[in-house]
Image: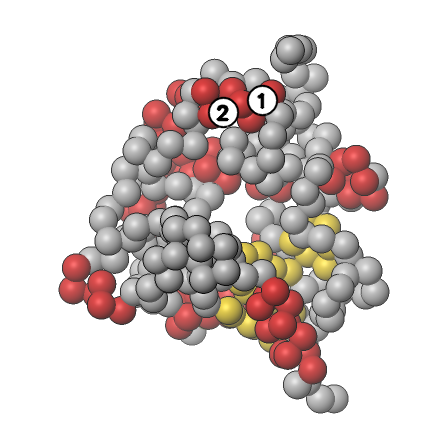
Amino acid sequence: MLELVPAQREMTVQDLLRHTSGLTYGVFGKSLVKEEYKRLDVDATEQSNTEFIARLAKVPLQFQPGTTWEYSRSTDVLGALLERVSGQTLATHLQQRIFTPLQMKDTGFWVPPAQQGRIAEPFAVDPDSKVPVGLIDVRHAPKLESGGGGLVSTAADYFRFAQMLLNGGEIDGVRLLSPKTVAYMTADHLGVMGARSQARGAAYLPGPGYGFGLGFGTRTGTGESATPGSVGDYFWGGVGGTYFWVDPKEKTVAVWMMQAPGQREYYRAWFRNTVYSAMTP
Protein backbone atom coordinates (compact mmCIF):
# COMPACT_ATOMS: atom_id res chain seq x y z
CA MET A 1 0.00 0.00 0.00
CA LEU A 2 1.34 3.40 -1.01
CA GLU A 3 1.43 5.76 1.96
CA LEU A 4 1.44 9.46 1.10
CA VAL A 5 3.03 12.14 3.31
CA PRO A 6 3.52 15.88 2.72
CA ALA A 7 6.78 17.04 1.12
CA GLN A 8 9.06 18.61 3.71
CA ARG A 9 10.12 21.24 1.18
CA GLU A 10 9.77 22.00 -2.52
CA MET A 11 12.35 20.68 -4.96
CA THR A 12 14.77 23.27 -6.32
CA VAL A 13 16.51 23.74 -9.67
CA GLN A 14 19.69 22.54 -7.96
CA ASP A 15 17.82 19.38 -6.92
CA LEU A 16 16.77 18.82 -10.52
CA LEU A 17 20.32 19.34 -11.80
CA ARG A 18 21.87 16.94 -9.27
CA HIS A 19 19.08 14.32 -9.26
CA THR A 20 17.98 14.91 -5.68
CA SER A 21 14.50 16.19 -6.58
CA GLY A 22 12.67 13.15 -5.22
CA LEU A 23 11.57 12.15 -8.73
CA THR A 24 12.45 8.79 -10.27
CA TYR A 25 12.07 6.83 -13.52
CA GLY A 26 9.27 4.34 -14.05
CA VAL A 27 11.47 2.09 -16.18
CA PHE A 28 14.35 1.34 -13.77
CA GLY A 29 13.69 -0.98 -10.83
CA LYS A 30 10.47 -1.49 -8.92
CA SER A 31 8.55 0.43 -6.28
CA LEU A 32 4.96 1.48 -5.64
CA VAL A 33 5.75 4.96 -6.95
CA LYS A 34 7.31 3.52 -10.12
CA GLU A 35 4.12 1.52 -10.61
CA GLU A 36 2.23 4.81 -10.57
CA TYR A 37 4.58 6.12 -13.29
CA LYS A 38 3.65 3.12 -15.41
CA ARG A 39 -0.06 3.37 -14.66
CA LEU A 40 -0.17 6.99 -15.82
CA ASP A 41 2.30 6.32 -18.68
CA VAL A 42 4.63 9.09 -17.52
CA ASP A 43 7.48 7.69 -19.62
CA ALA A 44 5.50 7.72 -22.88
CA THR A 45 7.38 9.11 -25.88
CA GLU A 46 4.30 10.24 -27.80
CA GLN A 47 3.67 13.34 -25.71
CA SER A 48 4.89 16.91 -25.58
CA ASN A 49 6.86 18.35 -22.69
CA THR A 50 3.68 20.08 -21.50
CA GLU A 51 1.77 16.79 -21.53
CA PHE A 52 4.67 15.06 -19.79
CA ILE A 53 4.64 17.58 -16.93
CA ALA A 54 0.86 17.24 -16.57
CA ARG A 55 1.20 13.47 -16.11
CA LEU A 56 4.22 13.69 -13.84
CA ALA A 57 2.44 16.18 -11.56
CA LYS A 58 -0.15 13.50 -10.71
CA VAL A 59 2.47 11.05 -9.38
CA PRO A 60 3.88 11.15 -5.82
CA LEU A 61 7.60 11.66 -5.26
CA GLN A 62 9.80 8.65 -4.61
CA PHE A 63 11.81 10.53 -1.93
CA GLN A 64 11.69 13.73 0.05
CA PRO A 65 13.35 16.49 -2.04
CA GLY A 66 17.04 16.99 -1.24
CA THR A 67 17.51 13.73 0.64
CA THR A 68 18.47 11.06 -1.92
CA TRP A 69 20.32 10.79 -5.24
CA GLU A 70 18.09 8.93 -7.69
CA TYR A 71 18.57 8.94 -11.44
CA SER A 72 15.28 10.35 -12.58
CA ARG A 73 13.07 12.47 -14.78
CA SER A 74 14.71 15.54 -13.21
CA THR A 75 16.52 16.51 -16.41
CA ASP A 76 13.32 16.15 -18.42
CA VAL A 77 11.65 18.58 -16.03
CA LEU A 78 14.53 20.99 -16.65
CA GLY A 79 13.90 20.69 -20.39
CA ALA A 80 10.24 21.58 -19.86
CA LEU A 81 11.31 24.46 -17.60
CA LEU A 82 13.59 25.82 -20.33
CA GLU A 83 10.64 25.84 -22.71
CA ARG A 84 8.55 27.82 -20.22
CA VAL A 85 11.31 30.34 -19.48
CA SER A 86 12.51 30.83 -23.07
CA GLY A 87 9.14 30.64 -24.82
CA GLN A 88 10.77 28.30 -27.36
CA THR A 89 10.67 24.59 -28.01
CA LEU A 90 13.61 22.79 -26.41
CA ALA A 91 15.05 21.92 -29.83
CA THR A 92 14.97 25.55 -30.97
CA HIS A 93 16.44 26.80 -27.70
CA LEU A 94 19.33 24.31 -27.74
CA GLN A 95 20.02 25.07 -31.39
CA GLN A 96 20.19 28.83 -30.85
CA ARG A 97 22.01 28.86 -27.52
CA ILE A 98 24.38 25.89 -27.78
CA PHE A 99 24.62 24.00 -31.07
CA THR A 100 24.92 26.95 -33.47
CA PRO A 101 27.42 28.98 -31.35
CA LEU A 102 29.59 25.87 -30.83
CA GLN A 103 29.35 24.87 -34.53
CA MET A 104 27.79 21.53 -33.61
CA LYS A 105 26.36 21.07 -37.09
CA ASP A 106 25.19 17.48 -36.74
CA THR A 107 23.47 17.57 -33.35
CA GLY A 108 19.73 17.56 -32.76
CA PHE A 109 16.72 15.44 -31.86
CA TRP A 110 16.55 13.76 -35.27
CA VAL A 111 18.49 13.23 -38.51
CA PRO A 112 17.20 14.83 -41.74
CA PRO A 113 16.62 12.44 -44.67
CA ALA A 114 19.70 13.63 -46.59
CA GLN A 115 21.95 12.64 -43.67
CA GLN A 116 20.30 9.38 -42.62
CA GLY A 117 22.86 7.28 -44.48
CA ARG A 118 25.39 8.38 -41.82
CA ILE A 119 23.45 6.89 -38.89
CA ALA A 120 25.41 4.24 -36.98
CA GLU A 121 23.09 1.27 -37.08
CA PRO A 122 22.82 -1.09 -34.08
CA PHE A 123 22.11 -4.79 -34.43
CA ALA A 124 18.43 -5.50 -34.88
CA VAL A 125 18.78 -8.32 -32.33
CA ASP A 126 21.24 -8.44 -29.42
CA PRO A 127 23.70 -11.20 -30.41
CA ASP A 128 24.13 -12.23 -26.77
CA SER A 129 20.61 -12.11 -25.32
CA LYS A 130 18.78 -12.63 -28.65
CA VAL A 131 16.37 -9.88 -27.57
CA PRO A 132 15.29 -7.27 -30.18
CA VAL A 133 17.19 -4.02 -29.74
CA GLY A 134 15.01 -1.02 -28.96
CA LEU A 135 16.84 2.27 -29.41
CA ILE A 136 15.41 5.67 -30.27
CA ASP A 137 14.33 6.09 -33.90
CA VAL A 138 16.11 9.28 -34.94
CA ARG A 139 14.76 9.29 -38.51
CA HIS A 140 11.69 11.24 -37.47
CA ALA A 141 11.25 14.39 -35.40
CA PRO A 142 10.02 13.27 -31.96
CA LYS A 143 6.96 14.69 -30.28
CA LEU A 144 8.78 14.62 -26.94
CA GLU A 145 11.95 16.71 -27.04
CA SER A 146 13.37 15.24 -23.89
CA GLY A 147 15.72 17.19 -21.66
CA GLY A 148 17.02 13.88 -20.31
CA GLY A 149 17.89 12.09 -23.54
CA GLY A 150 17.30 11.62 -27.23
CA LEU A 151 19.86 13.87 -28.94
CA VAL A 152 21.81 12.42 -31.84
CA SER A 153 25.30 13.68 -32.62
CA THR A 154 28.74 12.93 -34.05
CA ALA A 155 32.11 12.41 -32.39
CA ALA A 156 33.28 15.76 -33.77
CA ASP A 157 30.31 17.67 -32.31
CA TYR A 158 30.51 15.83 -28.99
CA PHE A 159 34.23 16.65 -28.81
CA ARG A 160 33.60 20.36 -29.34
CA PHE A 161 31.12 20.40 -26.47
CA ALA A 162 33.51 18.54 -24.14
CA GLN A 163 36.46 20.69 -25.20
CA MET A 164 34.41 23.79 -24.40
CA LEU A 165 33.99 22.46 -20.86
CA LEU A 166 37.70 21.66 -20.53
CA ASN A 167 38.51 25.20 -21.70
CA GLY A 168 36.36 26.65 -18.91
CA GLY A 169 33.33 27.43 -21.08
CA GLU A 170 34.96 28.67 -24.30
CA ILE A 171 36.10 27.30 -27.65
CA ASP A 172 37.45 29.06 -30.75
CA GLY A 173 36.65 32.49 -29.33
CA VAL A 174 33.02 31.61 -28.47
CA ARG A 175 32.23 31.69 -24.78
CA LEU A 176 29.18 29.78 -23.64
CA LEU A 177 29.86 29.65 -19.88
CA SER A 178 32.10 31.45 -17.43
CA PRO A 179 34.99 29.50 -15.85
CA LYS A 180 33.32 29.89 -12.44
CA THR A 181 30.08 28.39 -13.80
CA VAL A 182 31.94 25.35 -15.16
CA ALA A 183 33.77 24.93 -11.84
CA TYR A 184 30.45 25.12 -9.99
CA MET A 185 28.78 22.62 -12.32
CA THR A 186 31.58 20.09 -12.01
CA ALA A 187 32.02 20.31 -8.23
CA ASP A 188 30.48 17.67 -5.96
CA HIS A 189 27.01 18.89 -4.93
CA LEU A 190 26.14 15.96 -2.73
CA GLY A 191 28.56 16.90 0.06
CA VAL A 192 27.83 15.20 3.37
CA MET A 193 24.82 13.51 1.82
CA GLY A 194 27.15 11.61 -0.50
CA ALA A 195 28.96 10.14 2.50
CA ARG A 196 25.81 8.38 3.71
CA SER A 197 25.19 5.27 1.66
CA GLN A 198 21.43 5.49 2.13
CA ALA A 199 21.44 8.92 0.51
CA ARG A 200 22.92 7.57 -2.72
CA GLY A 201 19.85 5.56 -3.66
CA ALA A 202 19.62 1.92 -4.63
CA ALA A 203 21.51 2.36 -7.91
CA TYR A 204 24.15 5.07 -7.54
CA LEU A 205 25.29 5.34 -11.15
CA PRO A 206 28.36 7.59 -10.63
CA GLY A 207 29.91 4.72 -8.68
CA PRO A 208 32.51 4.54 -5.89
CA GLY A 209 34.91 7.45 -5.70
CA TYR A 210 32.49 9.84 -7.40
CA GLY A 211 30.13 12.50 -6.17
CA PHE A 212 27.70 14.29 -8.43
CA GLY A 213 27.65 17.84 -9.72
CA LEU A 214 25.11 19.58 -11.93
CA GLY A 215 24.77 16.89 -14.56
CA PHE A 216 28.07 15.06 -14.11
CA GLY A 217 29.57 12.36 -11.95
CA THR A 218 32.64 14.08 -10.48
CA ARG A 219 35.64 12.28 -8.98
CA THR A 220 36.26 12.99 -5.31
CA GLY A 221 38.97 10.43 -4.47
CA THR A 222 41.94 8.66 -6.02
CA GLY A 223 41.57 5.05 -4.94
CA GLU A 224 37.92 4.17 -4.49
CA SER A 225 36.92 3.88 -8.14
CA ALA A 226 37.54 0.69 -10.13
CA THR A 227 39.05 2.70 -13.01
CA PRO A 228 41.90 5.25 -13.18
CA GLY A 229 41.41 9.00 -13.31
CA SER A 230 42.16 12.24 -11.52
CA VAL A 231 40.41 13.97 -8.65
CA GLY A 232 38.11 16.47 -10.33
CA ASP A 233 37.53 14.56 -13.55
CA TYR A 234 33.87 14.39 -14.56
CA PHE A 235 31.82 12.19 -16.86
CA TRP A 236 28.48 10.87 -18.03
CA GLY A 237 27.11 8.36 -20.53
CA GLY A 238 24.16 7.82 -22.83
CA VAL A 239 21.55 5.10 -23.10
CA GLY A 240 22.91 3.92 -26.46
CA GLY A 241 26.36 3.33 -24.98
CA THR A 242 28.02 6.71 -25.50
CA TYR A 243 30.43 7.92 -22.82
CA PHE A 244 32.67 10.90 -22.25
CA TRP A 245 34.84 12.39 -19.58
CA VAL A 246 36.91 15.50 -19.02
CA ASP A 247 40.10 15.43 -16.92
CA PRO A 248 41.19 19.01 -16.18
CA LYS A 249 44.37 17.87 -14.40
CA GLU A 250 45.57 15.96 -17.46
CA LYS A 251 44.02 18.50 -19.87
CA THR A 252 42.27 15.57 -21.52
CA VAL A 253 38.91 15.07 -23.23
CA ALA A 254 37.75 11.56 -24.13
CA VAL A 255 34.67 10.69 -26.19
CA TRP A 256 33.37 7.17 -26.83
CA MET A 257 30.66 6.86 -29.47
CA MET A 258 28.68 3.65 -29.65
CA GLN A 259 25.24 2.52 -30.78
CA ALA A 260 24.89 -0.89 -29.20
CA PRO A 261 22.44 -3.18 -27.45
CA GLY A 262 22.59 -3.20 -23.67
CA GLN A 263 25.08 -0.29 -23.64
CA ARG A 264 28.02 -2.76 -23.38
CA GLU A 265 29.26 -0.81 -20.35
CA TYR A 266 32.46 -2.84 -20.06
CA TYR A 267 33.75 -0.96 -23.10
CA ARG A 268 33.58 2.25 -21.10
CA ALA A 269 35.94 0.85 -18.46
CA TRP A 270 38.19 -0.59 -21.19
CA PHE A 271 38.30 2.78 -22.96
CA ARG A 272 39.19 4.67 -19.78
CA ASN A 273 41.83 2.12 -18.79
CA THR A 274 43.36 2.30 -22.27
CA VAL A 275 43.53 6.11 -22.34
CA TYR A 276 45.21 6.38 -18.93
CA SER A 277 47.55 3.47 -19.65
CA ALA A 278 48.84 5.37 -22.67
CA MET A 279 49.69 8.52 -20.71
CA THR A 280 53.32 9.29 -19.93
CA PRO A 281 54.83 11.98 -17.65
- Circle 2 packing at 10 Å, graded few (<14), some (14-19), many (20+), is many
Percent position of residue 154, x then y:
37, 67
Density class for disc 1 (Cα within 10 Å; few <14, some 14-19, many ≥20) is many
57 and 171: which is toward the camera = 57
In-front residue for pair 264/273: 264
Check disc 2 and give the amino acid type: Tyr
Could you tell me which residue is drawn at 30 percent across and 33 percent down?
Answer: 46
Quadrant location of the N terminus?
top right
Q: Quadrant of residue 232?
A: bottom right
Q: Residue at x 66, y 85 (%)?
A: 278
Residue at the disc numbered 1: 33
Is residue 179 shown to the viewer in this render? no
- Residue that carries the numbered disc 2 in the rendered image: 37
**Residue ID at (29%, 65%):** 119
Q: Is residue 50 left or right of residue 131?
A: left
The residue positioned farthest toward the front in the image shown: 130
137 or 163, which lies in front? 137
Real-space CA distance between mark 2 and mark 1, rounded to the nearest whole angstrom? 7 Å
Q: As displayed, is residue 190 above or below residue 24?
A: below
Q: Identify the secondary structure beneath mark 2.
A: helix
Contact (Cβ within 8 Å) of mark 2 with mark 1 = yes
Residue 244: image location, x then y, percent? 55, 64
121 up-or-down from 270: above or below: above
